[in-house]
Image: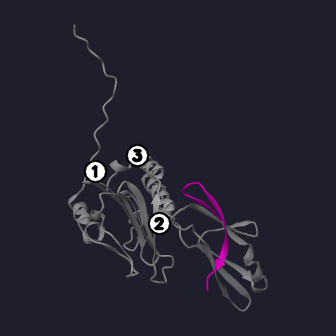
Amino acid sequence: LLLLRCSHEVPAPPPCRQQHSESDSLYLASDFTFGQHIRFADSTISMPAVSSYDTVFWYRGSGWGMFDHLCALYNRNDRWYSDLVYQPDMLKRVCIKTTREIDKKRVDEFRSMLDSFNTRCKPVLIDTIGRNYTIDAPHYDFLIKEGPDLRYFSWGSQCFPCEQSTRPPVLEMRFLMARLLMGSGYPEPKLFCYAQTFSDSITIEYYLNDRTLVKNARFIFNNQELIADESLKLPRSQAAEIKNLWAEVTLLNGDTLKLSHIISK
């Protein structure tokens, strides 16, 4: 008597293999990204090379004279940690580095988000369609290293400014990196104002110091919405009304902040 059993289990599809051009392979092997310690403007701080990790989710964003931050989520002895480096003031060559242990549940949630966006199968260059290319544009790198398997993603040169991009791959990567940074303790944005006084008027420039975590922002003065990236001009007699300027900020994770202004000297 021969008994046959039917299996209804569907085999898992083979993992996709990210295609690398020759230039991509050279970039992965370069000192900056893969082979050596990562350096910052603050010479007292460095980060290990990506190649030194067995399993790591590694991200760096930088813009000349604008921002510089790096986050590495990695496994060590079956425990998960996150190293975060950021430069709070681009006018000062000082960086802050923190390390915190991350609950495995949070790591699993992040991995699930990577899978939900099919991240591991995306091309190396996320923003290959775009305009306003500039060599000084902010640049973003994200690497997934799981044992010998390495995937590398880059964006920034074409989507500048990336916070205004509507392309789904860029939006997805910004969302994922914001979740990675927020879980590591990256600071929330602040609203800064710079006031210039003239004989009969005062001109106020208003801006967020960092849009890394920001989905959108509204600037409000005396219950009226202002146009972003412009300045506010008031009679000098009304200079005290600057206290009525604030911002409503929606973060990429959906949280909403109401920010009071900070006077920039």
Neighbourhood count class around disc 3 (C-alpha, 10 Å): few under 14, some 14–19, many 20 upward:
few
Q: Which mark is residue 115?
A: 3
**Label 2: element kind:** loop
Please indicate, yes or no, whether residue 138 appears anywhere in the rendered image: no
Work out which quarter of the rendered image holds the C terminus and state it.
bottom right
Which residues are drawn in magenta?
248-265
**Residue kind at label 1, given as amino acid type:** Gln
N-term mark: 2 or 3? 3
Point out residue 117 in the picture as x, y percentages from the top left corner.
42, 47
Q: Which residue is mark 1?
A: 18
N-term mark: 3 or 1? 1
For the stretch drawn in magenta, the main secondary structure is: strand
**Residue kind at label 2, given as amino acid type:** Pro
Q: Quadrant of residue 217?
A: bottom right
Q: Quadrant of residue 2?
A: top left
Name of the residue lying farthest toward the bottom: 199
Q: CA distance from mark 2 to mark 1?
A: 26 Å
Neighbourhood count class around disc 2 (C-alpha, 10 Å): few under 14, some 14–19, many 20 upward:
some
Question: Seen in the image, is 49 located left or right of residue 91?
Answer: left
Q: Which residue is mark 2?
A: 161
**Label 3: element kind:** helix
Residue drawn 44% across and 48% down?
108
Point out residue 97 in the picture as x, y percentages from the top left corner.
45, 73
